[in-house]
Image (cartoon, rainbow, N blue to C red):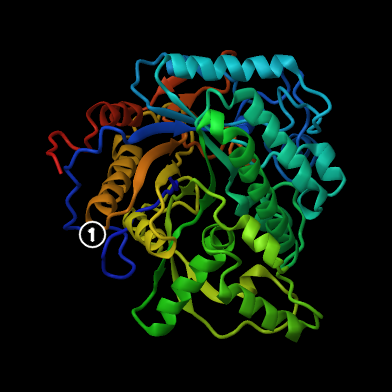
Amino acid sequence: MKVILFLCLSCILTVGRAQDDDYVVNNKYFPDKFMFGCATASYQGAWDEDGKGQNIWDNLTHTLSRTAYRKIRTMETWPCYVKENWVLTTIGFSISWSGKYLPTGFPYKINEAGVQYYRNFIKELKDNGIEPLVTIFHWDTPQGLHEVGGWLSEFIVDYYAEYARIVFQLFGDDVKYWLTFNEPKQTCQQGYGSGEKAPFVQSHGLGEYICTHILLKAHAKAWHIYDDEFRPTQNGLVGITIDTPWFEPNTTSDEDLEASERQLQFEFGWYANPIFNGDYPEIMKTRIANRSALEGFQTSRLPEFTQEEIDFINGTFDYLGLNHYSTYMVSAMPEPEIGDPSWEKDTGIAVFQDPSWEGSASDWVKVTPWGMRKILKWVKETYNNPAIIITENGISDNGTLSEDLDDESFRSHYYKYYLSYLRDAMIEDGVNVFGYTVWSLMDNFEWTRGYTEKFGLYQVDFSSGNRTRTPKKSATYYSKVISTRCLVDTCEEE
């Protein structure tokens, strides 16, 4: 069975509206087998315990002035949440490539203390009836691998594949849901293109394409390793998580409708199309080849897959994860001038958010729940209705200890409406969604934003020695949703 994970909403609304005033929250029960959960990632935990090795984020946040936030890291005490008397059906987390059990990132040295840590954690989840949803790579490339080329070098495909094989060997008997990569766009486009995230390489219009080309091969190789060596005995599922906003046309003109589709292909299809449909989207291949020629390149800046590689990558999914938070407006614009290349110029779309939309502590997260249904429907229609689980969805506060515990009208409202449009997509559009995980379980270190933006259901007091956790009101609401499988006080069967 092919299964897919996604995170988005949608509804047929007047173009650009943040909320339909007449919209009624869905009052149909979620299916009994629908998976509700929470998520975080290994980097948001302790950074230097139990023999953990260094990754690119450890290195950069400690040595560069680029980020002002030192790592006053949270302690990795997941079990305290397992025992909060919730009825979670899944918890999403990642395994650190250089952390805990494989400190150098290379397979020659395995840290047994790290292996036991993950085994204990997975066992505790299973003992409490919680299904582990495990991401193999969440941005934290081992520092040693980065220093010899990282995701710009083909050699990393084999090292990543061997890392994945070891993960499957060690934990696969107890894990049924795997994700090879979380948000590869952030690794490649922001890590090796714009340089906004580690390793902060600025190679506009070139580095992100090379990185993606290599990463997709690594994903496919890991999937085939599982399919050939482990699926017959472990019976698990392997997917990939891709993130995208919804891109709403600014008008109903043909030009703006085309702009919306183009932006979706450059954001999401860039990664999904080779896996689900075979090869990069045609619009990407055409535009980048044309602009590359005009810029003086002898070949397209977008690398080409061989037919053998296309066949190897195509179909390497059992499910897909989508991370979805917000929506952008898009409109057609004149073709960008030829000059220094960039992914943004290759896309050639004007992208913006309506200033009237309700915001958050994160300038990129606006409350636009109707986008969830639209992106889910688009994915269904573009990729032949795969099975979907929402792997990240959430909204941030500014972490003020005395004020942000009372987030009922803020975060609870966000969850209610995004989940409602998700349920609409399931019922009205026939989208095959089987689960939803909130980002995030608790306040944590938000990459270059440090601790200025907090997404947690649980507030963490980083000034206290034991990092005191306090549930926000949204935790109570979400717990009730999980218990009742209902978004409102009274639900009815579909």
Q: Where residue 94 appears, x then y in whole percent?
A: 59, 33
* Tag 1: amino acid: Asp
Which sits in the foreground, 367 or 230? 230
Residue pictured at 79% horizontal, 55% vertical: 152
Which sits in the foreground, 63 or 349? 349
Residue pictured at 20% horizontal, 47% vertical: 25
Q: Is 95 situated above or below 188?
A: above
Image quadrant in which you'd find residue 494: top left
Residue pictured at 34% horizontal, 49% vertical: 432
Image quadrant in which you'd find residue 169: top right
- How many neighbours does mark 1 have within 10 angstroms: few (below 14), some (14-19), or many (20 or more)? some
Q: Is residue 444 left or right of residue 143?
A: left
Image label count:
1
Q: Is 293 situated above or below 453?
A: below
Q: Is 183 situated above or below 83?
A: below
Determine if residue 66 is in view. Answer: yes
Q: Is residue 226 left or right of residue 304?
A: left
Q: Is 151 situated above or below 106?
A: below
Determine if residue 77 is in view. Answer: no
Q: Where residue 98 appears, x then y in whole percent?
A: 74, 31
Q: Which residue is mark 1?
A: 20
Residue pictured at 79% horizontal, 42% vertical: 64
Q: Secondary structure at mark 1?
A: loop
Q: Where residue 43 appears, x then y in whole percent?
A: 64, 32
- Quadrant holding the N terminus: top left
Q: Where residue 243 appears, x then y in whole percent?
A: 51, 52
Q: Is residue 46 left or right of residue 362?
A: right
